[in-house]
């Protein structure tokens, strides 16, 4: 019996529980029928503070929760946090205010579970605060956690009220485990991490009720990968090294469990001693070793260069052909943000977004010289996205389709997933939101059947003129609905019943 399946069957939590599969399938696969898009039911909330102080979270059929941090208003001591709950018809159900906790809490991330929102905040002292917003009981509960004082936060997930927090302590990655409401202090989970280990984002597997984490160890310019998983109580299920036979650097890896209970790993690799991606791979592990691992250079993908203008595409393809004539591969070296994989219709779908960091340069006086010397310093100024790729594999690791999509988005100070992908009956659809518009593209049997299509997100009034649209988000909500939300500065010169200028948080229900 396969190693992974054996462990999961012992706990009666494997994926063949059809009732669980049907319940969560829409959330995990994000299937899109995007022939006709209807943008309706818009809500606007006028901003009372900076846009950074607002967060919107979709809770499937439980609706939407909006968090508003009013801590930076002039009245200071009266700082408050506001939570608002809207149902799936975008009708406000309830709103509550709580006094903002004392101290400099920094919002980090959120996770959801069974109609509840969990937001995590950190303090420099090492104290963590988890705010639980329960839409069913209409209550907000504070959970204080004394974490490691020198822990730098990276990520967290919640599974059956157990919290997993990843971060670094004295330069070494760690994973903390804590049960909400428990008097037991957080525990550091068993691992084999070193200061040269890099952790990927924690992956919560709802169907199997485990938390998975992929780590990469670097020695010189070479990497080795390991995948681990934990039950909700922190017990380790598996701890497997991934060592390909080919001389490749595995850069990223997302883990899944196939229908046979074996582990599938999909991610990016480099052909040389590099941290930049040259292609994508898929591998299968049965707990004893790797059954197969297949590598696909970007130049082998049929539609990879479609995001480029025609002239640039043809030039790169010619360069690639010349390289191949000499037995070499074109070294593209991309940075890729890899999404969690999902399975549908026997296909395992990989989605990744290419980006690069932006820097600016400033001339500053050197304080150590008494201000006599001036030096030039390089300052990080955000990330710029270029394109997204999507690829499908069967359970033998064979590539079944691929596609690419140019991304037109402003620079972001923090990496986040912009693109959404769905797959149904051989049809793959790629879409994202930017500048108040939804962009989409369709691929079937490795052929582009619909080029880039654009649809504007409607505003509240016909005479509205959008002056600026930013922090544009598009995410799956429930059934055949998406949620588009962000911030806009709007001017209306024609409607006397509307303010001339307004800055709003907007969210639109998108039917497809």
Image: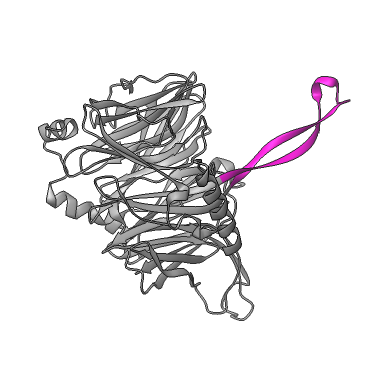
Query: What's the coloring here?
Result: one colour
Residue drawn at (52%, 59%) of the image: 307
* Place of residue 96 in the rendered image (x, y in percent of width and height, measured from the top left): 39, 51
Magenta range is 356-383
Q: Nearer the viewer, residue 233 or 128?
A: 233
* Place of residue 17 in the rendered image (x, y in percent of width and height, measured from the top left): 12, 47
Q: Is residue 90 above or below residue 218?
A: below
368 drawn magenta:
yes
Which corner quadrant holds the N terminus? top left
Which corner quadrant holds the C terminus? bottom left
* Place of residue 22 in the rendered image (x, y in percent of width and height, measured from the top left): 18, 55
Q: Decide if residue 76 is on the left or right side of residue 370.
A: left
Is residue 489 visible in this depiction of the protein?
Answer: yes
Q: Decide if residue 137 is on the left or right side of residue 339.
A: left
Q: Nearer the viewer, residue 404 or 58?
A: 404
Q: Furthest residue to the front?
A: 325
189 drawn magenta:
no
Count of numbered circles on the image? 0
Q: Is residue 199 above or below residue 500?
A: above
* Place of residue 80 in the rendered image (x, y in percent of width and height, measured from the top left): 49, 45
Q: Decide if residue 233 is on the left or right side of residue 399.
A: left
Q: Nearer the viewer, residue 65 or 205?
A: 205
Residue drawn at (51%, 67%) of the image: 437
């Amino acid at each position: 019996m396969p190693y992974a399946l054996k462990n999961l069957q012992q706990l009666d939590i494997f994926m063949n529980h059809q009732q669980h599969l049907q319940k969560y399938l829409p959330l995990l696969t994000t299937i899109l029928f995007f022939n006709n898009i209807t943008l309706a039911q818009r809500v606007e909330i006028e901003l009372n503070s900076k846009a950074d102080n607002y967060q919107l979270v979709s809770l499937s059929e439980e609706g939407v929760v909006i968090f508003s941090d009013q801590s930076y208003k002039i009245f200071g001591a009266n700082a408050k946090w506001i939570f608002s709950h809207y149902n799936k018809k975008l009708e406000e159900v309830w709103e509550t205010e709580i006094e903002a906790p004392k101290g400099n809490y920094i919002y980090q991330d959120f996770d959801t579970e069974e109609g509840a929102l969990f937001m995590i905040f950190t303090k420099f002292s090492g104290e963590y605060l988890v705010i639980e917003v329960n839409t069913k009981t209409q209550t907000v509960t504070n959970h204080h956690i004394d974490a490691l004082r020198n822990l730098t936060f990276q990520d967290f997930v919640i599974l059956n009220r157990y919290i997993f927090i990843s971060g670094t302590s004295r330069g070494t990655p760690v994973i903390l485990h804590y049960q909400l409401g428990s008097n037991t202090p957080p525990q550091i989970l068993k691992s084999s991490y070193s200061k040269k280990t890099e952790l990927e984002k924690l992956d919560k597997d709802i169907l199997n009720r485990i938390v998975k984490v992929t780590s990469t160890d670097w020695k010189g310019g070479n990497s080795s990968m390991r995948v681990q998983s934990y039950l909700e109580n922190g017990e380790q299920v598996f701890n497997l090294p991934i060592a390909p036979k080919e001389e490749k650097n595995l850069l990223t890896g997302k883990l899944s469990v196939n229908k046979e209970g074996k582990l599938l790993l999909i991610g990016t690799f480099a052909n040389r001693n590099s941290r930049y991606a040259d292609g994508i791979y898929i591998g299968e592990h049965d707990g004893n070793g790797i059954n197969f691992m297949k590598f696909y250079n970007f130049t082998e993908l049929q539609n990879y260069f479609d995001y480029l203008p025609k002239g640039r595409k043809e030039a790169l393809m010619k360069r690639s052909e010349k390289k191949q004539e000499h037995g070499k591969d074109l070294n593209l070296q991309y940075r890729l943000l890899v999404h969690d994989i999902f399975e549908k219709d026997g296909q395992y779908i990989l989605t990744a977004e290419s980006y690069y960091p932006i820097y600016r340069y400033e001339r500053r006086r050197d304080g150590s010289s008494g201000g006599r010397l001036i030096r030039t310093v390089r300052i990080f100024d955000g990330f710029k996205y270029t394109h997204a790729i999507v690829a499908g594999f069967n359970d033998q690791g064979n590539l079944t389709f691929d596609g690419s999509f140019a991304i037109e988005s402003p620079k972001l100070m923090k990496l986040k997933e912009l693109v959404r992908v769905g797959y149904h009956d051989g049809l793959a659809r790629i879409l994202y939101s930017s500048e108040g518009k939804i962009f989409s593209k369709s691929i079937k049997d490795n052929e582009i059947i619909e080029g880039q299509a654009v649809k504007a997100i409607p505003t509240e009034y016909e005479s509205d003129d959008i002056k600026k649209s930013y922090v544009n988000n598009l995410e799956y909500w429930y059934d055949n609905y998406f949620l588009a939300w962000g911030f806009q500065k709007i001017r209306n010169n024609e409607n006397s019943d509307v303010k001339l200028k307004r800055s709003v948080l907007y969210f639109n229900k998108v039917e497809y």
